[in-house]
Amino acid sequence: MFKRTVFALAISAVLGTAQAAPVCQPSAYNVWLDVSGSMMLPQENGSAESDDGKDVPKIAHAKVFLKKLAQANQGESETGIFTVAPFTIQQEPAKLSAEEYARLLDEKIPENLESVGRMTWLGERAKAQLSREKHLVLVTDGDFSKWKQDSKVPAKKAFDVFRAGGGKLTVLSLAGNDEEVARLHEVFGESDIVDLVSVLRDVRQTDQVVERILDRRCTPAEAPVLELQGINFDFDKATLTSGSSRILDEALNVIRLQYAGRKMEIVGWTDSAGSDAYNGKLSLARAETVKRYFAGHGVDPERMTVRGAGKSFAYDNRTAHGRWMNRRVDIRFPEK
């Protein structure tokens, strides 16, 4: 929670308070890389070239994009690296820095494997892993083999079951000809397929696909809290202790400087002594005391609501000091 405390001797510490920003967390995802023979070849249309004009294998383009994805993720969400044809676990899901992820890709995903006789297919281990996935990024050129298909897991059926179970799928296509594109559509349809070569030519498209995969979920920041400790109340009373006026005046300065015009919720608390019902009433009376003070010093009463929160356990009620700290008032500032 975004909190600042007004102490009797350290009031100036709150004057730099700023509004907390929403918290945005990328979704966890796993990457499946097709490392079949065709992925070790350049695309037939000649579009997969390096900066020096030389043809590069499709798998190299996959790694370029995945490094950009890891850079945007910044290790905030877990990701793993798996391969198909054959199925291997190269990295269990973990929070990896962009540098760690790039190193793993370069170390574990070669670009010069044999290109002949190595086909794209799914086996039982891949099927078992697929049943555990929730958010999958599959990089492939779409050349799923139908050779000896009776002994293999039907790719279309496996991924249909995955999506029917709520799994999220993004297929990054490195298909290099119409036949490969058609095979991809046969297995996955069209809605989940992204033409990776086209995307990599356009920075804006790259960023859009990266954000689509990361699917950041933002939660609003909790309302800022001004915790007033020093305007404490005597035991079993709602009257302010001596010296409280100076603390309240400094709190008013903070409100005027940083929260002018903002709605405020004034929340009263008690220590743990006594019944819940009694402390609910006492904490409300304390909040109303602070509201009256603020209203008497120019704060529009319409801006302020009050609430009695009852017993506080934020501080140790077993000690006299902890009980004193719990007998306080918080000022909360909901979103505008």
Image (cartoon, helix red, strand yellow):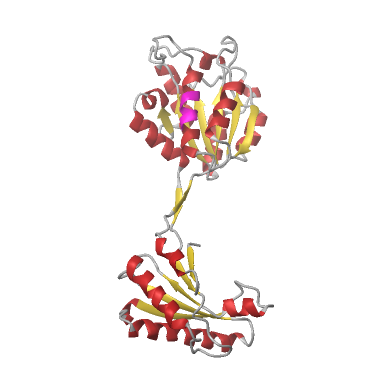
* Residue found at x 37% / y 36%: 208
Quarter of the figure with the C terminus: bottom left
Q: Position of residue 333 (x, y in %)?
A: 40, 69
* Residue 302 % position (x, y): 31, 80
| Quarter residue 20 falls in | bottom left
Specify whether 155 is left or right of 259.
right
Is residue 136 placed above or below 306 in the rendered structure?
Answer: above
Vertical position of residue 289 compared to residue 4: above or below: below
Q: Name the residue nearer the viewer: 242 or 312.
A: 242
Decide which of 166, 68 is in the foreground and name it.
68
**Residue 106 location in percent, x, y?**
57, 22
Q: Residue at x 34, y 83 (%)?
A: 295
Tally of marks: 0
Most frequent secondary structure within the magenta stretch: helix
**Residue 194 within the segment the image draws in magenta:** no
In the image, residue 155 sits, relative to residue 55, either above or below, namely below
Q: Is residue 4 visible in this depiction of the protein?
A: yes
x, y percentage for residue 120?
57, 20
Which residue is painted at 30% across and 81% down in the image? 298
- Asked which quadrant contains residue 99, the reply is top right
Query: Looking at the image, which is closer to me, 296 or 112?
Result: 296
| Residue 223 visible, this orientation | no
Query: Considering only vertical position in the picture, is 216 above or below 101?
Result: below
Q: Is residue 66 magenta?
A: yes
Magenta segment = 63-68
